[in-house]
Image: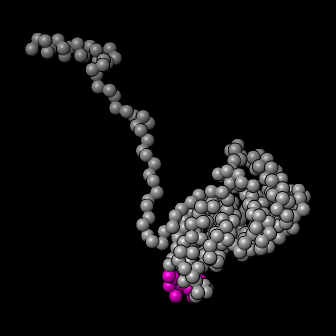
Amino acid sequence: MQDALVEKLMDEVIRKMGGSESSPAPAASPAEKPAAAKTAPKACNLTEFVGTAIGHTVGLVIANVDPLLHEQMKIDKKYRSIGIVGARTGAGPHIFAADEAVKATNSEVLLIELPRDTEGGGGHGSLIVFGAEDVSDARRAVEVTLSELDRTFGDVYGTPAGHLEFQYTARASHALAKAFGAPLGQAFGITVGSPAAIGVLLADTAAKAATVVPTGFASPGNGGTSYSNEAIFLFSGDSGAVRQAIRAARDVGKQVLGTLDPAAVVSSTKPYI
């Protein structure tokens, strides 16, 4: 009993002197606790679900569209199946990706709309609907579009102050013709700048840099955008000239956008033009 008393007294002395190896470790403060693991997106087992991609993009397919929806959406009844791609950001990347899907599949673009979005930014989201007589073609069109987005986001640059976008194809197909009036089979490019003032400068830079054929110009109030704070220049021509015009505009745009916010002006994925 005496030994127990002595041991208790010694423990009390050691505690007052700052603790010992046998002293219990203090509880970790909230800041010291390991951070909770980031929750992964939920799985989706619906047969209509195809996949997701950059830009908060979702791909879906409907094998047999209800006749009532056919009528309301004004879809030709021969297209029993539709593929659907929708995104919060990146209208240009999605339309150029959809153009590749049309080239690779037996499908047609039925609808392209540009909602005012960019998750609160200065540009658009997108809604693209493919039509096909067979569900496998509709699904494949969506799959190709999703797979192309990592590439077509390569020349999209965003900061808290705005964004730049540049797109190019050596051979425009029906999606670009439907959305932008691109001449079929010709090289085609676009420059986009937000705030719209930067977009105007990009358009002038591109036009001066090479011999291209302008096919359109869109600004917040002229009907070419969903009143978004951006200006878009569309042009076709020789493949080399279109690329040269885009590269010149890209160099200028990155310099100007960089003056508005300290954040670096970097590619969303990997530049491809």
Residue at the far left: name it.
1
Task: Inspect this view and state whether residue 224 appears.
Answer: no
Q: Nearer the viewer, residue 105 or 112?
A: 105
- 62 horizontally vs 264: left or right: left
Residue 45 image offset from top left, x and y in percent: 42, 66
How many labels, in total?
Answer: 0
Residue at the (54%, 65%) spot, across then down: 58
Picture layout, residue 216 above or below residue 37: below
Q: Nearer the viewer, residue 87 or 131?
A: 131
Residue at the (82%, 50%) spot, across then down: 252
Residue 154 image offset from top left, x and y in percent: 68, 54
Q: Nearer the viewer, residue 43 or 72?
A: 43
Q: Quadrant of residue 12?
A: top left
- 231 horizontally vs 43: left or right: right
Q: What's the image's color scheme?
A: one colour
Q: Nearer the viewer, residue 124 or 9?
A: 124
Is 71 colored magenta in this rendering? yes
Residue at the (11%, 11%) spot, across then down: 2
Picture layout, residue 8 above or below residue 259: above
* Residues rendered magenta in the picture: 64-73
Residue 112 image offset from top left, x and y in percent: 66, 74
Task: Inspect this view and state whether residue 183 appears.
Answer: yes
Is 168 colored magenta in this rendering? no
Q: Quadrant of residue 76?
A: bottom right
Picture layout, residue 71 above or below residue 213: below
Position of the N terminus, as image quadrant, is top left
- 68 horizontally vs 150: left or right: left
Residue at the (82%, 67%) spot, across then down: 236
- 242 horizontally vs 49: left or right: right
Position of the C terminus, as image quadrant, is bottom right
Overall secondary structure of the magenta section: helix
